[in-house]
């Protein structure tokens, strides 16, 4: 099965494009927020070659685990399929449009990843290379020319809505992603990719991957703001216009939070505007990138 076929099967297994509220990737996972999790057929998803496991996130979230060299390519194919305009139905369209009959909602508190038992079902190195080539063709066909935006969030921001709501508000991370993507589209970006990790090296890797791919970066390094020379060096290396964002007024908090290593590589810092600060940053980046 090629990457496009895999993405189509995943979409069919979660109830179709109309059931997807938001999607993003985090490390090796396709992270989804769904309108109705009862439409998910996890047995079908787990049977797909290239899928290593699934896990539930709260009441409406689902994560699908792929190999590290396939998750981004599968995500891009999935995004392309999800955002296609409806057309006359054929056999393949029916497969995407109909909800899975076997879907059984898992308990909301379940977070354990269910790994497939058969190691022989995982993709071989030759399969990965073949899929790379196939997906390159797919991406080339589906690509839209225009500026691209990367939103990078550091540790604990995945806990938005739970973490100290008196400071960080009640907006969840999934809602933040939706707002960023909506604002980016309205500002003229053809793509807005949102990435979050609790690990410094992963954030550095993501910034490095943005070179020659993204035209602007919105970065909230969270706690790494005050400690990470590595993130500063990564930003300097790629030299992509970047806005530093903080939900709270960090300059009015503890002394250690008033130090920012990344600020030197950013053309602007927005702090204390809550979630709206991300939208402010995207608009300012659009003016800089699209002028």
Image (cartoon, rainbow, N blue to C red):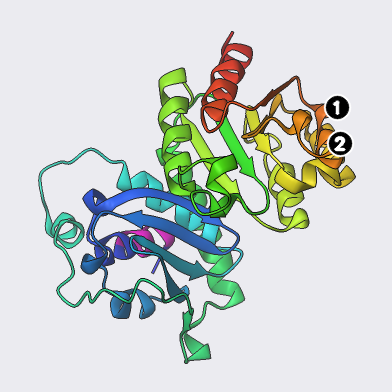
- Does the magenta portion include 5? yes
Image quadrant in which you'd find residue 88: top left
Disc marking residue 264 = 1
Give the numbered dot on residue 261: 2
Helix or strand or loop: what does disc 1 sit on? helix
Q: Tell me which segment is drawn in magenta.
A: 3-8
- Please, which residue is most extreme toward the front here? 166
Structural crowding at the residue carrying mark 1, measured as other residues with C-alpha within 10 Å and reported as few (<14), some (14–19) or many (≥20): few
In-front residue for pair 101/128? 101
3D distance between C-alphas at marks 1 and 2: 7 Å
Quarter containing the N terminus: bottom left
* Label 2 element class: loop
Q: Residue at x 47, y 40 (%)?
A: 176
The reply, left or right, for residue 193 in relation to residue 225 is left
**Which secondary structure class fits the magenta region best?**
helix
Camera-nearest residue between 236 and 130: 236
The reply, left or right, for residue 88 in relation to residue 149 is left
Residue 56 x/y as whole percent: 40, 70
Question: At 58% from the left edge and 49% from the top edge, which residue is drawn?
Answer: 164
**Circle 1/circle 2 CB separation < 8 Å:** yes
- Residue 146, relative to residue 64: is it above or below? above
Left or right for 77, reference 202 = left
Q: Quadrant of residue 85?
A: top left
- Name above or below for residue 45 compared with residue 280: below
| Quadrant assignment for the C terminus | top right
């Amino acid at each position: 099965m090629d990457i496009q076929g895999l993405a189509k099967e995943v979409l069919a297994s979660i109830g179709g494009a109309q059931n997807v509220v938001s999607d993003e990737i985090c490390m090796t996972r396709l992270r989804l927020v769904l309108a109705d999790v009862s439409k998910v057929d996890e047995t079908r998803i787990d049977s797909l070659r290239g899928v290593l496991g699934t896990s539930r996130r709260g009441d409406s979230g689902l994560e699908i685990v792929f190999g590290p060299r396939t998750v981004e390519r599968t995500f891009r194919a999935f995004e392309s399929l999800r955002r296609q305009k409806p057309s006359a139905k054929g056999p393949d369209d029916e497969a995407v449009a109909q909800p899975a009959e076997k879907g059984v909602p898992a308990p909301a508190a379940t977070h354990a990843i269910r790994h497939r038992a058969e190691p022989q079902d995982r993709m071989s190195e030759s399969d990965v290379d073949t899929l790379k080539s196939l997906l390159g063709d797919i991406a080339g066909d589906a690509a839209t020319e225009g500026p691209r935006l990367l939103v990078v969030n550091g540790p604990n921001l995945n806990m938005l809505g739970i973490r100290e709501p008196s400071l960080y508000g009640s907006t969840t991370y999934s809602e933040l992603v939706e707002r960023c993507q909506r604002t980016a589209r309205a500002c003229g970006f053809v793509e807005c990719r949102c990435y979050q990790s609790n690990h410094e090296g992963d954030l550095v890797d993501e910034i490095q991957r943005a070179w020659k791919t993204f035209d602007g970066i919105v970065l909230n390094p969270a706690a790494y703001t005050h400690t990470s020379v590595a993130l500063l060096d990564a930003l300097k290396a790629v030299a992509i216009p970047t806005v530093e964002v903080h939900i709270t007024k960090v300059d009015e908090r503890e002394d250690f939070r008033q130090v920012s290593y990344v600020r030197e590589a950013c053309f602007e810092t927005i702090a204390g505007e809550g979630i709206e600060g991300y939208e402010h940053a995207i608009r300012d980046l659009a003016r800089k990138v699209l002028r």
